[in-house]
């Protein structure tokens, strides 16, 4: 049994069919990546998993239980946590307060303190900026807050939607290093990325989405070597 299983999931926005019959699995301990062009349905897949859009068909199992009809906030309690596309940092709150929002359902003070230490170790920049308002952080720093906040919930499955979007090259490298480190520390990761080269080289396995359907599924290594993937997503003929 995988940690996460999507069985023939379809999602529609009115008459627009965004996902058609998607099946995928994420095993405990893996980094799995979803790659695909703009509009392929990557964000919709993440929203279906976190409960932000209803399924028109199919089912989603998490940790052996059917969660297809479970409310989004209760999926967070079960351990599914998303760092949203576009970051979603609260501008009027400090960095520390933003991070605290990630664990507002928790009461285990000692473990929360440990998790603050862990997040500040992963992101030393955030430690320096702990009292700065979220709205005054740079784009890359806001991305760090969004990931750090998701980690404060101690997720079993971390959903990351385009964590490298809009970042300078040295920041991109750093974000991917941190994702690898988070995974090594025991968190399972589902990663959506435009940066297919980085994502596939870090992931255990990957899926290619094209106009709402899964067209390829393999190890990250095999997908990197696949001529069709190379041509469409890696910018090499
Ligand atoms: N709220 C919505 N209402 C109507 N159509 C939507 C809505 N959200 C997404 N769509 C459509 O569903 C399809 C999939 O969108 P989605 O955001 O999942 O793509 P994506 O793979 O994440 O793309 P990108 O790489 O640009 O982020 C697109 O055709 C999009 O226009
Ligand atoms: Mg998207």
Image (tube, helix red, strand yellow):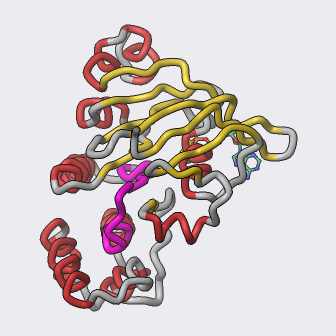
> Where is ligand 1, by quadrant?
top right
Residue at x 62%, y 26% (from the top left corner):
213
Q: Is residue 95 inside the magenta stretch?
A: no
Q: Is residue 210 left or right of residue 177?
A: right
Residue at x 42%, y 85% (from the top left corner):
104
Query: Image quadrant for the N terminus?
Result: top left
Numbered marks: total: 0
Q: Is residue 155 inside the magenta stretch?
A: yes
* x then y, percent, for residue 110: 19, 88
Q: Is residue 70 above or below residue 117?
A: above
User: In this orientation, which residue lies closer to the viewer: 148 or 171?
Assistant: 148
* x then y, percent, for residue 71: 64, 66
Residue 80 in sight here: yes
User: In this orientation, which residue lies closer to the viewer: 216 or 89?
Assistant: 216
Query: Image quadrant for the C terminus?
Result: top left
Q: Is residue 172 above or below residue 52?
A: above
Residue at x 25%, y 51% (from the top left corner):
179
Q: Which residues lie in the magenta part? A: 150-164
Place residue 93 in its image quadrant.
Answer: bottom left
Q: Is residue 14 above or below residue 125?
A: above
Q: Is residue 137 left or right of residue 127?
A: right
* x then y, percent, for residue 48: 61, 50
Residue at x 85%, y 45% (from the top left corner):
14
């Amino acid at each position: 049994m995988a940690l996460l299983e999507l069985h023939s999931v379809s999602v529609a926005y009115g008459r627009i069919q965004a996902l058609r019959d998607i099946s995928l699995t994420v095993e405990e301990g893996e980094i799995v990546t979803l790659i695909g062009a703009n509009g392929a349905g990557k964000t919709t897949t993440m929203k279906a998993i976190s409960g932000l859009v209803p399924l028109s068909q199919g089912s989603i199992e998490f940790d052996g239980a059917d969660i297809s009809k479970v409310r989004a906030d209760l999926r967070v309690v079960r351990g599914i946590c998303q760092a949203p596309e576009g970051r979603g940092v609260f501008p009027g709150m400090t960095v520390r307060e933003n991070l605290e929002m990630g664990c507002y359902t928790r009461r285990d003070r000692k473990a929360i303190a440990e998790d603050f230490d862990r997040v500040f170790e992963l992101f030393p920049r955030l430690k320096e900026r702990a009292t700065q308002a979220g709205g005054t952080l740079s784009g890359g720093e806001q991305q760090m807050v969004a990931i750090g906040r998701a980690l404060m919930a101690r997720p079993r499955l971390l959903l990351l939607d385009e964590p490298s979007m809009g970042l300078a090259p040295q920041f991109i490298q750093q974000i991917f290093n941190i994702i690898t480190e988070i995974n090594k520390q025991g968190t399972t990761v589902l990663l959506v990325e435009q940066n297919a080269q980085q994502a596939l080289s870090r992931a255990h396995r990957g899926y290619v989405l094209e106009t709402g359907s899964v067209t390829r599924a393999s190890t990250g290594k095999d997908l990197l070597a696949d001529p069709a993937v190379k041509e469409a997503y890696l910018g090499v003929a």
